[in-house]
Amino acid sequence: MVSPPYGHPSDYETEVIRRQTDLTPTDTSSWSFTPLQDLDGAFTPNGLFFERHHGGIPDIDPAAHRVMIHGLVERPLVFTMEDIMRFPAVSRIHFLECSGNTLTEWREPTSPTVQQSHGLLSNCEWTGVSLATLLNEAGVKSGAKWIVAEGADAAAMTRSVPIEKALDDALLAYSQNGERLRPEQGYPLRLLLPGYEGNMNIKWLRTIKVTDQPGHTREETSKYTDLLPDGSARQFSFEMEAKSVITRPAAGHRLKKTGFHEIQGLAWSGRGKIIAVDVSTDGGHNWQRAELEEPILPKALVRFRLPWRWDGEPTVLQSRAIDETGYVQPTREQLINARGLNGKFGSVYHYNAIQSWRIDRKGEVHNVHA
Ligand SMILES: Nc1nc2c(c(=O)[nH]1)N[C@H]1C(S)=C(S)[C@@H](COP(=O)(O)O)O[C@H]1N2
Ligand SMILES: [Mo]
């Protein structure tokens, strides 16, 4: 066998694939989940990065692509991709999570695998140019408070970002894990807002308008808002709060033997570093500190591990993340008390409660609400 010009996984690994949702009848607006149960370490291979599009995946020739910065700036500018590549490059490791990740958990624990419950989550090394660099080229005028970023897809996805974030760690990324973005990740250029909800990370980026107020776009009014128990709506959530999940053993797995099993999972926080992950092997009565695998980076996935012996009795596994702000991942009950279930339309976004996996006598692992 000779190596192919572009390598691909072994023929024995054909089950390690993204899987699409079964909630959408067409793929014009759809999403597919990362197989978290099959991955090691903290990085998501590019071909398995979760993917969400609202208006198809456009085919964009980088030579024809333009990015415009306008609005409250001294010098409106239009960049080609070649212009963008001439600026100093920055590489950083960050997770991306759709704020609709785990949305089914608001109601019944219907997702049969961790891929389907938590797989709108990936992590990679992004390379691009700092948005602050380009905004400084254009010269931000006083009174600027927001940027409004728009994609070049059929959905023309548009989101508003506070100017402080735009000038802080925001990137215009053109690479993921060392190679150019995959078409479905926003080729040739996307906005990357470390720690912020997936939706704001505009793919196929074409326009940045500097403004004194948010755009109040569709994605900021009808979608991605959270109705609270007092009837008010939280409009801008920005950071994804600390969360964790055990990826092995997880729903869909079967423990074939009693005795030693290593519990493994992932933890992350949109507000900074994970400082600890606790694991319970008895449905939340007792908790043990898991080991965190280095490097532990802010706004990036961290793998945790805990050695464990299964005695053959039914039990429930849980994990809980704590981040550097002191925030502790809530139980399902705490989350619902704070956010409500919102009547017949129901809560949708920003579910980050502790996940429970029940192991039955046969060793089968099931998604449950414990
Ligand atoms: N232009 C554009 N940007 C977009 C979207 C889109 O449909 N169009 N989807 C958003 C949503 S909802 C998410 S969760 C992330 C997903 O990024 P990924 O597909 O690279 O995982 O992209 C965001 N950026
Ligand atoms: Mo999303």
Image (cartoon, rainbow, N blue to C red):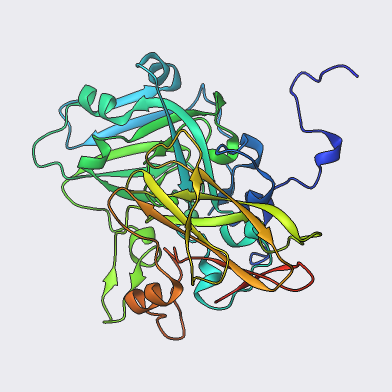
**Closest to the observer: 50 or 312?**
312
Of residues 354 and 233, the one nearer the viewer is: 354
Q: Quadrant of the C terminus?
A: bottom right
Residue 28 appears in the figure: no
Kindly identify the residue that appears in the image at 44 percent across and 16 percent down: 82
Residue found farthest to the left:
142
Task: Say which residue appears at 29% left-offset and 72% top-offset.
Answer: 233
Residue at the limit of the structure toward the right, as seen here: 1
Give the side of residue 254 with respect to residue 134, left or right.
Answer: right
Residue 268 place in picture, x, y as percent = 44, 49
Q: Does residue 86 sit above or below 145 in this rendering?
A: above
Residue 197 coordinates in the image, percent (x, y): 40, 52
Total label count?
Answer: 0
In this image, 186 relative to 314: left or right? Answer: left
Query: Front-most of 305 and 331?
Result: 305
Q: Residue furthest bottom?
A: 343
Q: Name the residue rendered at 39%, 50% in the picture.
A: 269
Horizontal arrangement in the rendering, residue 199 relative to residue 216 (left or right): right
In the picture shown, does residue 269 fall above or below 184? below
Q: Choose top left, top right, bottom left or bottom right for residue 326.
A: bottom left
Q: Quadrant of the N terminus?
A: top right
Taking depth in this image into account, of 258 and 332 the one nearest to the observer is 258
Image: 171 above or below 14? above
Q: Can you give x and y, in whole percent of width and height, for residue 196 in the image?
A: 37, 48
Q: Position of residue 149 (x, y in %)?
A: 34, 43
Residue 214 can be seen, yes or no: yes
The residue at 64%/64% (across/down) is 24
